[in-house]
């Protein structure tokens, strides 16, 4: 499927002592929600930090909104003003109060709408309108409320791109559903112009909002594509115990029980299983992600080494 | 008895014993002596030392850990205006700190003049030198203390940093007011140069720490 890119990247290289992020080619489709998926330490946060400009120590080329490069991002206020980023760790200093956070965001971002921000704080149940709530400290907020505060900040701005690092992790299921609705509404404004990129481990909860997926493992992109295309590319296969050993030659990471087996393989490999008594199903995004992650993750490699030994 | 000593050592580190067990009591004895011997003009020096300590404790609650690697404010770093706001806030604090000491000294000097009469030019010069000296000590101290994120060790490091300033203030008092042997004009000129130097250092440090937070290598 052809698409315009909100962000394009080439040969992005970031080296740490024990980890290297090495992305040959990156294309984030404009007008869609892209999920960055991968195990802990796969490089999702590093990639988002590089895209947001909060980590400038990397090599490679980046293009934003089809016309700005990463030098423009640092020199032209329009680029960063159009990118809303929420990160992990100390996004706001823990001793700041809600009042200070509001004033800070007015200073930091040109398109910050204070009234919209206050509405969002109420909508997200961070404040209820009682007295002295402005003096509540960040350190006294729960992890979920800290995320909601960051989201209120970025959604109260006039942006074209949201980069959200693990927005769903500390949220309760109800709030995750609300987050999906809010992101859907965000994408619907000026249809086709706004883009969301988020990293997540809560694949099932966030599937309803996900249009495009990038799976990162050990610093590399190992799979990417539109969700619907990936659901065509992979297929869930279930079969009886007697066929398990044959099926395991085609299906990697097959899970076995006393009744039979289940696994995912490429749809194009389905012909190789002809003759077996199998049932097939359309996979969920979570099943595809786990399948891909099992193939490339550091954890799977340790497991495989242990099995071989 | 051995176990009592062991138990005491478990809860009291060497820094605690040296600073709070020995250094601070001695410092207070010395201060007490000075206040008793020369309470008149020396009182404002002692009070300003307490003000310096209070200012540094205050700085922890405003900027504590702002230069440390573990305290990276994402909101500032993802904004185009992040550096401007960050450096601006630190330099505003420098200006506020200078005005704080200058006004405090002016108030003390004014009160002294009202109560006991005008004490002379040397007294006014010493007041101005003190304002600059305490600003200087404050500026140098915060540049180091803002790396500290743990309040448990903050007072120990703070005490070590302000001690030379306190000793200098005592010498300036003794030689400048008591014995009248110090060239106060020269001392004032030196203090102005040092205070300007500390301000420039703070500005450059703030800028470089912001840049380092964007470029600094994280351990992984």
Image (cartoon, coloured by chain):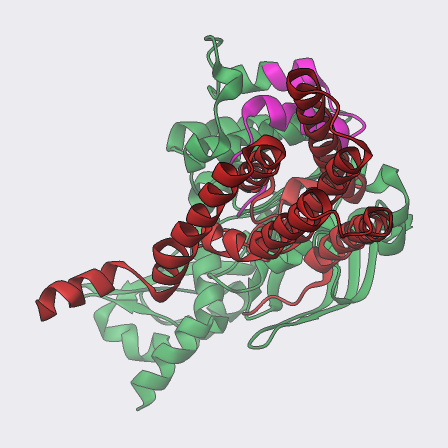
**Viewed as shown, does residue A117 lie left or right of B15?**
right
Which residue is outermost to the bottom? A309
Chain shown green: that is: A
Residue A241 magenta: no
Which residue is outermost to the front? B179
Q: Is residue B106 above or below residue A227?
A: above
* Residue A284 seen by the camera: no
Identified at 45% across, 8% down, the residue is A130
Chain shown red: that is: B
Q: Is residue A286 above or below residue A32?
A: below
**Viewed as shown, does residue B157 lie left or right of B195?**
left
All told, the count of numbered labels is 0
Q: Position of residue A296 (x, y in %)?
A: 50, 72
**The quadrant where residue B19 appears:** bottom left
Residue A90 magenta: yes
Q: Position of residue A304 (x, y in %)?
A: 37, 81
Q: Position of residue A271 (x, y in %)?
A: 48, 70
Q: Is residue A128 above or below residue B44?
A: above
Q: Quadrant of the C terminus of chain A?
A: bottom left
**Is B143 or B194 nearer to us in this picture?**
B194
Identified at 50% across, 64% down, the residue is A41
**Is A157 or A67 nearer to us in this picture?**
A157
Q: Position of residue B163 (x, y in %)?
A: 56, 54
Residue stretch in magenta: A89-118
* Residue B19 seen by the camera: yes
């Amino acid at each position: 499927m052809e698409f315009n890119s909100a962000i394009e990247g080439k040969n992005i290289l970031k080296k740490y002592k024990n980890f290297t992020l090495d992305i040959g080619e990156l294309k984030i489709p404009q007008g869609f929600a892209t999920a960055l998926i991968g195990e802990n330490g796969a490089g999702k946060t590093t990639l988002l930090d590089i895209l947001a400009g909060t980590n400038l120590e990397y090599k490679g080329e980046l293009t934003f909104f089809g016309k700005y490069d990463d030098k423009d991002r640092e020199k032209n206020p329009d680029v960063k003003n159009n990118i809303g980023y929420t990160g992990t760790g100390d996004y706001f200093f823990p001793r700041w109060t809600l009042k200070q956070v509001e004033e800070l965001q007015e200073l930091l971002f040109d398109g910050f709408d204070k009234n919209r921000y206050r509405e969002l704080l109420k909508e997200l149940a961070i404040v209820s309108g009682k007295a002295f709530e402005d003096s509540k400290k960040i350190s006294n907020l729960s992890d979920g409320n800290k995320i909601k505060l960051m989201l209120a900040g970025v959604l109260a701005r006039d942006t074209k791109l949201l980069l959200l690092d693990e927005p769903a992790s500390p949220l309760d299921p109800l709030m995750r559903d609300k987050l999906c609705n809010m992101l859907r509404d965000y994408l619907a404004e000026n249809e086709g112009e706004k883009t969301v990129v988020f990293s997540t481990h809560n694949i099932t909860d966030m599937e309803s909002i996900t249009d495009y997926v990038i799976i990162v493992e050990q610093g590399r992109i190992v799979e990417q594509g539109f969700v619907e295309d990936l659901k065509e590319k992979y297929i869930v296969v279930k079969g009886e115990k007697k066929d398990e050993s044959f099926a395991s030659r085609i299906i990697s990471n097959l899970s076995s029980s006393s009744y039979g087996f289940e696994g995912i393989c490429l749809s194009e490999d389905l012909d190789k299983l002809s003759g077996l008594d199998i049932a097939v199903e359309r996979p969920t995004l979570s099943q595809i992600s786990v399948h891909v992650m099992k193939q490339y993750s550091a954890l799977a490699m340790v497991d495989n080494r242990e099995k071989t030994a | 008895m051995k176990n009592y000593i062991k138990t005491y050592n478990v809860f009291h580190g060497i820094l605690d014993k040296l600073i709070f067990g020995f250094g601070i009591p001695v410092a207070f004895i010395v201060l007490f002596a000075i206040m008793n011997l020369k309470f008149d003009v020396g009182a404002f020096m002692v009070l300003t030392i307490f003000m310096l300590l209070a200012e540094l404790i205050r700085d922890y609650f405003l900027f504590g850990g702002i230069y440390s690697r573990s305290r990276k404010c994402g909101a500032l770093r993802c904004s185009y205006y992040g550096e401007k706001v960050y450096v601006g806030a630190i330099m505003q604090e420098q200006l506020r700190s200078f005005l704080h000491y200058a006004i405090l000294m002016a108030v003390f000097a004014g009160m002294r003049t009202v109560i006991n009469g005008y004490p002379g030019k040397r007294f006014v010069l010493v007041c101005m030198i003190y304002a600059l000296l305490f600003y200087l000590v404050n500026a140098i101290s915060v540049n180091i203390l803002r790396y500290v994120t743990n309040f448990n060790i903050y007072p120990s490091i703070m005490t070590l940093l302000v001690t030379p300033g306190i000793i200098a203030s005592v010498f300036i008092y003794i030689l400048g007011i008591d014995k009248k042997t110090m060239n106060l004009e020269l001392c004032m000129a030196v203090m102005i140069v040092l205070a300007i130097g500390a301000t420039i250092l703070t500005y450059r440090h703030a800028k470089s720490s912001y840049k380092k937070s964007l470029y600094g290598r994280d351990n992984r």
